[in-house]
Amino acid sequence: MFDSRRRTLITVFVVIELVIVGTMFRSVSFGGNGHFMRSMASTSIPADVHTTVATSLAPHVLIDDDDATIIVRATTGTNVTVDERTVVHGSVSGVNALHVERTSDGVRIDRGSEEYIRVFGQFERTLTVSVPTATQLEIIAAKTANVDGLRGDASIHGDDGEITVNDHHGSLDVQADDGRVLLTNIEGADVSVKNDDGRVELTRVHAQSLNVRTNDGGVVARDLTVGNGTIAADDAAVDVQFAAGNNLTIDMTTSDGHVDIVPPLAASSDGDGDSDSDNKHAQLRIGNGGGHLDVSTNDGRITIAAESAATRGV
């Protein structure tokens, strides 16, 4: 009789403990209305920053936040406005407060020191930065970056996500460690893109000097205008369609693939003055052939087309 009652009490206590633990787990995992989740998150996350800094018509804006999605938009005036938004579901620690500092030539936006973020649940951070149109932009580190409407030079380094630049007039230097790079409506003296692990897409890019290199990803260009440069993919195809008005001599080489030149364009030679039976090397002249572009890949096809030819994907 005593053992039976004892077993009954133990069973009741075990059930109560399971209910408590289950409630706590659901609060942490699903970001419900439980106070347990909120208290854990709120003790470790600094308040979001919303601030405006008076600068100049063409400030140097430096941004360094490798765990944030960074959005940069050009606006009229001379102010730099920073809006931070943090979304947390669960437990997060090791997050530093955002620092926005007026410098001698513009604004610096960073975390002050290296972060060691520990996440149990979900953690997302977005920085939206409005800057004067002629800003000289330097993004040292970002998770992903989206830049639109600038009329000054820009340097962008993304750690682990997509980099998008649209309607940009000025030199541009983009480096991506892992993620797609999309450039649309770009006019610049020097346009450089290096992508370690991802695709590069160029649409209506006009550059006096173009340098595009990928280690593991294809290159697609549409309505491209270039004075001189290099397009090189280490392990994927290259597909380029030129806009009207180019004056280029184009040398094309693929180590494991073939060169496909879409009519009405036609190769002048294989680059050495001889015909190329294996279609791995070719030389093409557009316009007066005054500029020079090297196009190469180690593993993939090369497709070159003129403005009127049907576009195709890689």
Image: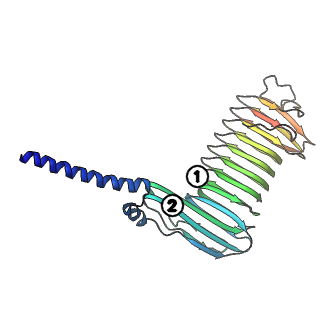
The answer to whether 10 is drawn above or below residue 239 in the figure is below
Badge 2 is on which residue?
Answer: 87
Give the quarter of the figure containing the C terminus: top right
User: Is any atom of residue 116 visible in this view?
Assistant: no
Per the image, label 2 sits on a secondary structure element best described as strand
Mark 2 crowd level (few <14, some 14–19, many ≥20, 10 Å Cα)? few
Q: Which residue is found at the position 38% from the left and 53% from the top?
A: 26
Q: Amino acid at mark 1?
A: Asp
Where's residue 94, x and y in %? 44, 61
Per the image, label 1 sits on a secondary structure element best described as loop
Q: Which residue is found at the position 59% from the left and 63% from the top?
A: 127
- Which quadrant holds residue 99? bottom right
Where's residue 309, x and y in %? 85, 37
Badge 1 is on which residue?
Answer: 159
Where's residue 6, x and y in %? 11, 49
Q: Which coloring applies here? A: rainbow
In the picture provided, is 35 more to the left or to the right than 100?
A: left
Q: Amino acid at mark 2?
A: Val
Mark 1 crowd level (few <14, some 14–19, many ≥20, 10 Å Cα)? many
The answer to whether 228 is drawn above or below residue 146 in the figure is above
Outermost residue, left side: 1
Q: Nearer the viewer, residue 72 or 301?
A: 72
Q: Which badge, 1 or 2, comes first in the chain's sequence?
A: 2
Q: Nearer the viewer, residue 175 or 290?
A: 175
Outermost residue, front side: 1
In the picture provided, is 69 more to the left or to the right than 191?
A: left
User: Of tags 1 and 2, which is closer to the observer?
Assistant: 2
Q: Nearer the viewer, residue 302 or 14?
A: 14
